[in-house]
Amino acid sequence: MKKHSILWAAAAATSLALLSACGGGGGDSPAASTPPPVVVTPPPVVNPPTPPATDPPPSTPPAGPPVIDPNNPPDWLALANRCERPRAGHADAQGTLMDELKWLRSFYGETYLWYRELPTGLRLEDYTRAVDFFDDYKTWASTASGRAKDRFHFTYPTEAWEGLSSSGTEVGYGVTWSRNADPAAPRVWAVAMVAPSSPAALAGMRRGDGLSSVDGVALTDNTVDGVARLNAGLFPAAAGEAHRLVLTRAGVPLTVNLTAAQVDNPPVQNVKTIDTPTGKVGYLQFDDHNQLSESELAKAIGTFKAANVVDLVLDMRYNGGGYLAVANELAYMIAGPAATSGKIFEQLQYNDKTTPQPPDMFRTKAYGFKSSQLAGGAALPYLGLKRVTILATAGTCSASESVINGLRGIDVEVNLIGGDTCGKPYGFIPANNCGTTYFAIQMQGANNKGFGDYADGFQPTCRVGDDLDHALGESAERLLSTALAYRDSGICPAQPMANRARAASGAVSGPMTLVRPQVREIAIRNR
């Protein structure tokens, strides 16, 4: 029996525009508009989601994978880009909503990792938007701990996805927010990170500033109108939108007027060396495995190599992932050729309808992304370290976790300082159709030792709360200072009281979590 090859299909179906090394097509489908972040809505129901009403009890799994003949390709190849509303300037053909729905059912029926658990009773005729069907077309099983097995199923406008995946550009103010993790408590938001030269930076916003109100609406407002206005002000839909935020800094109110713009979010920042009695330690803030980061990481590692650093602190506390090839290259640049030669960085495991793929060995040469300044095949610099310290939180996700797992698979000592990582050993091949990019789990990764079971995240070596009272990269910042102390003594230092975020209601204690869309927490297969 012949099995389906995702990679063969991607090459054969150029009109589908599965993500390649230089990205896919653009789009502006109304159905693909970004959903309002759940963090500013009233507290969500904490019970597991209910499967669609049309979903019958799981049927008996088929006896084996279907026969897929490359000379008689599956329906989704012919249905790709047959759109209900074709976009001008794109390779869209006039089609119907039913064409889009059938494309989804065909494509993910073949490539979804848990295709045997897809609901079989969904009626396409009951859907008025393709994205709504996609939301229901996934496994509804739960893990042993009661969490949804598939928590990672989502869509994004293709045009917006292209900007993020290539250079990190997006419409907004250039601010990353952190919020209190307890959905039942009154909202508390604080600035976690500000992009250089962004509207937020030019307005004087800083890490640790608390949020009080947006356009005159208190952050704690739970009315329908209030929530809508908070969303509109915090997440502007277009460049040029102007909104007023009231912040607090050290208990003093601060009003800022912001105009949304197309913001560049640099993936690599704060590259510096720290002098210690036992040698130089490199510090690197790494926020996004996007295309641009390939050359930026190589430049940083080259700087560290020239400085003869003996250790590295890699700050990935807010890095949700991105391209697995970048994660692979970074792991190699840390460990070097002696530790990685002939070793597997990650073996991606697909469903049994898919032709098994060869493992991804450690990359010694650059992939050469479109937005990177490195040419494909350029030799990568390396440090040859036998240990690395990674600053991590629940915002450390997906491809970032692949770096951790890949290095541990070749016996590089990886010490984690901070909190549990997010727990996403899964990857995607983003698929663009009619202006929407669909993300459904199609693979799970394992390292050189065959380990890939970290759905509950990696636990920290030293547990430390995120410190919003200091800038990232400051030696006094709690995660970094803990990393340096642990390096010297091998003992986790005693921690002060739980980190406190400043907010309109005053300083409050408790865990915080990042505010960002799922598209920033992914592992992307780029070939």
Image (cartoon, grey):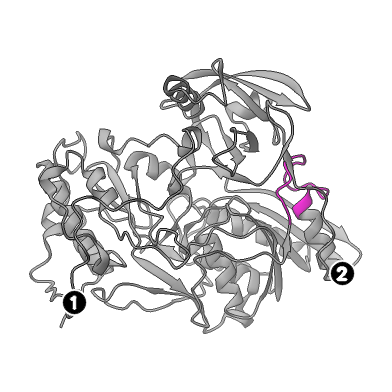
**228 lies above or below 502:** above
Identity of the residue drawn at 51% across and 56% down: 321
Secondary structure of the residue carrying numbered label 2: helix
Q: For the magenta stretch, what is the residue range? A: 464-479
386 vs 278: above or below: below
Q: Is residue 477 one of those drawn in magenta? A: yes
Q: Position of residue 279 (x, y in %)?
A: 86, 66
Labels 2 & 1 near each other (Cβ < 8 A)? no
Tag 1: Cα neighbours inside 10 Å, few (<14), some, or many (≥20)? some
Magenta-colored segment: predominant secondary structure? loop
At x 49%, y 74%, the residue is: 452
> Can residue 11 be seen?
no
Tell whether 284 sits left or right of 234.
right
Nearest the eye: 375 or 338: 338
Q: Is residue 395 above or below residue 159?
A: below
Can you identify the residue that label 1 sits on? 65
The quarter of the picture where the C terminus appears is bottom left
Picture coordinates of residue 25, whole percent (x, y): 29, 45
Q: Residues within 10 Å of mark 2 (few under 14, many from 20)?
A: few
Q: CA distance from mark 2 to mark 1?
A: 54 Å
Indicate which disc, 2 or 1, sits on the residue closer to the N terminus.
1
Query: Splitting the image into 4 quarters, where does residue 406 fall?
Result: bottom right
Kindly tell me whether residue 325 is visible in this rendering.
yes
Residue at which label 2 appears: 489
Q: Which amino acid is tagged 2?
A: Ser
Residue in front for this viewpoint, 270 or 251: 251
- Amino acid type at mark 1: Pro
